[in-house]
Image (spheres, grey):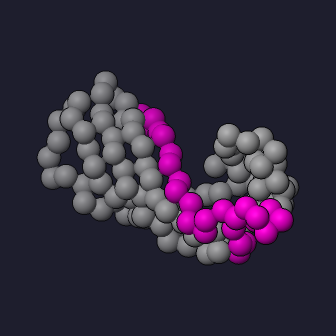
Amino acid sequence: VDLRLLESKDERRDLEVRRNWLETAVYPLATFIPLEIRNFPPSWAEGEPLTFELYGLIEIREIVREATFSVEAELNDGLLTGTAETNLLMTDFGFDPPEILGIVRAENEVLINLQFTAVAE
């Protein structure tokens, strides 16, 4: 994931987070290496929802941590589409939650939500 492209509802905040906390000029990418699929249903049919977990390693700012994504997906016409979510702590990746003038402070926990489309072969 190119962290330089992360967006929220506040462009100025996004710039500060990218520059001062994620340091995207030095660490532009976050990577996830999937290692195991867990709780995959023993049977499923095209067009039916699938839920399972995807376990692996996530790297942000050259720090690697384990992560488990909860996945909801559906296979239709050879395309697997869905969402994957996990929670991460900013402090686990070497930076404190953003704080502005001691007045506004972000939570340490961040919900990561990915939407994906994959070609089934």
Q: Is residue 63 visible?
A: no
The C terminus, quarter of image: top left
Viewer-proximal residue among 34 and 58: 58
Q: Residue extending furthest left?
A: 43
Residue 103 picture location, percent across and down: 76, 64
Please state the extent of the stretch shown in magenta in the rendering.
94-121
Q: Position of residue 38 (x, y in %)?
A: 30, 62
Residue at (49%, 62%) from the top-left corner? 87
- Which residue corresponds to the image point at 37% horizontal and 63% vertical from the top-left? 36
Give the residue drawn at x 39%, y 35%: 81
Relative to residue 27, is residue 114 depicted above or below?
above
> Considering only vertical position in the picture, is 94 above or below 74?
below
Q: Residue at x 50, y 46 (%)?
A: 114
Q: Seen in the image, is 15 located left or right of residue 104?
A: right
Q: Nearer the viewer, residue 53 or 13?
A: 13
- Asked if the stretch drawn in magenta spans residue 103, the answer is yes
Do we see residue 1 in this rendering?
Answer: yes
- Say whether residue 70 is left or right of residue 13: left
Residue found farthest to the top: 77
Residue 11, position as x, y percentages in the image: 77, 41
Q: Nearer the viewer, residue 79 or 63?
A: 63
